[in-house]
Image: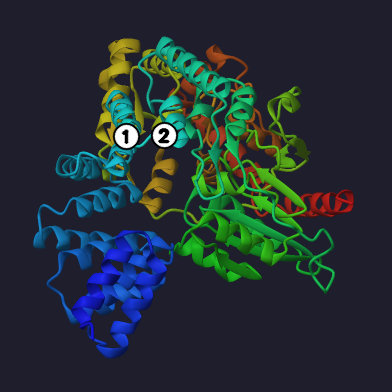
Amino acid sequence: MPTISDAYQIALRLHREGKTGLAEQIYRNILAVEPEHAQSWHLLGVAAIQRDEPERAAEYIERAISLNSSRAAFFANLGVAYRMLGRLGDAERVLRRTLDMDPRFASAYSTLGLTLCDVDRADEAIPYLQRAIELKPSDALSAAGLAYAWTEVGCVDEALTAYRYAYDLSPSPKLQLAEATLLPLVYRSADDLLAWRGRFEEQVSRLVDQRLRIDLTTEAATPTFTLAYQAFNDRPLQEKIAGLHRAPPDPTIDRRPGRPDGRIHVAFLSSHFNRHTVGKLQRGMIAELSRDEFFVSVLSVGHHEDDVAEFIRGHADQYVELPRGLPDARQAIVGLRPDILYYCDIGMDSSTYSLAFSRLAPVQCVTWGHPVTTGIPTMDYFLSSGLMEPADADEHYTEKLVRLDSLGVYYYRPPKPAPANRQDFGLDPDAHLYVCPQSIYKFHPEFDNLLGEILRRDPRGRLVLIRWAYKRSDDLLRERFATTMPDVLDRVDFIPRLQQSQFVSLLGLSDVLLDPIHFGGGHTSLDALALGTPVVTLPGRFLRGRITPGLYRKMGLMDCVAEDPEQYVVIAVGLGTDADNRRHVRQRIRDANGALFEDRDSVRQLESFFRQAIAARS
């Protein structure tokens, strides 16, 4: 009779040979005889990880640890399961314990580094990923993770090196595309931007010529999020990039109405149903769509816990957290039988970008959470606003462009901030504050000329920016300013990152908010205008540079909308230096800003579009 030890060794060998099913049966047989055999519980968990079943994996490995808490491997694999579940704090905790137990555990360094990237701590992740590669030079996953981390902190040369190393270890189309489409967050100059644009175009064309294809059956696509910030028509490139992906065969969908009560089933889909711009822009529409006509599902990629997430969950007729794996997520969506699949954004997250390549509902549309075309042939409509789009906008989209007469969002008026003063932020109480509290990748090199000229014309002016998550990117922007505006660099203040309540307080304390050119603000402008803070803006060529002008157009108030760069500077300095003028404009904004908030017209127009889209599908 084989002993339990013999059976375990047989199962272990089968597991290593990839015969996981046979191995699992032996583990279960062992546990039927010896329920406290910790190694079998652990390896059942490992098998569940391999099958992409993290909940079951965590359950089995937690059981193993309850029986034997001295094995570093148990904690390492529990960290993997927790990361898969999105329990990132728990993952970090158990992985750090793993390394306390065994400081040479390469996979724990790797998983911890990837977990830190997941929570926007890429700078902390880098040494862990480097250590993982030192301990296991053949680890392509750690090398790819290191490339991502270097990109996030703004070190693109190091990122390129890491991508090439990862590709040499494990060649894959996905790594080829990631390396080919790498872009900095901050460009050193306008010429540097053009050089990176040229490289991007050349590399993508090369991959098209090579007929490279990324199989989206199980592999997630890599969106090119930062491309949109270069201020070009990205439709040709987006089409080429979409063409590099091969979606699995579309599942069979029922094109008949899916609800027995006759209501149209609209499913909102995003990975950002939380205190993110997308969540704030879409929560009102989710809550306000007529329930007499519409059944509203919310399909969330990932688990979220904050006030916006709670609001959205509470106002959906059906809230579903999609499975992690793409095949399961696709099947889950089809099983819900939505009539309309409404992507709140495409291009910021690999999961939603990947899902968009499949026909999962009779009508599929996207709106301006990420305001650029997807290039994806299965996306039917791009819902935008006639208040924002230029006359030639149809040329910018592969989708059929729908110009709503409204903004297309139902945005709740933000609460007034608590009383604050400039000293709370370390700012000069007597200065004229020109504030641009935007993400660092919105600072196009051409914007520098306007910022520098504003400070030159107002000697009491100070430009206030918010530090980025990673110091290297801030340093790159400062270095560029030292070349483009060295004479006024001493009046540029980078303040620490802020909590939401502090952020809104800063908007209220600003003399003037400066909307970046080419890719401006959205919810930041809405929050500022709610307080009466003037936002100076210059309409760009594309939707992404025309959102704030669209808000002013909705209000019927164009005082702060410039026609050219010179007028942008004149308007900004006029508001910054003339207190009476500023008070007058603030009052006009407060008198008119009701048009922006709780806008029932936006709801009615979206409902009308949904009805028309359903009628047209037959």
Q: Are marks 2 and 1 in contact (CB under 8 Å)?
A: yes
Q: The residue tagged with tag 2: helix, strand or loop?
A: helix
Q: Position of residue 85 (x, y in %)?
A: 39, 63
Q: The residue tagged with tag 1: helix, strand or loop?
A: helix
Q: Which mark is residue 166?
A: 1
Q: Which residue is mark 2?
A: 175
Q: Position of residue 239 (x, y in %)?
A: 64, 28
In the image, is 475 to the left or to the right of 202?
Answer: left
In the image, is 360 to the left or to the right of 209?
Answer: right
Q: Position of residue 571 (x, y in %)?
A: 53, 21
Q: Is residue 559 visible?
A: no
Q: What is the tally of numbered marks visible in this picture?
A: 2
Q: Quadrant of the N terminus?
A: bottom left
Locate residue 124: give its quadrant: top left
Between 542 and 513, which is closer to the camera in this rendering?
542
Q: Is residue 51 visible?
A: yes
Locate residue 586: give its quadrant: top right
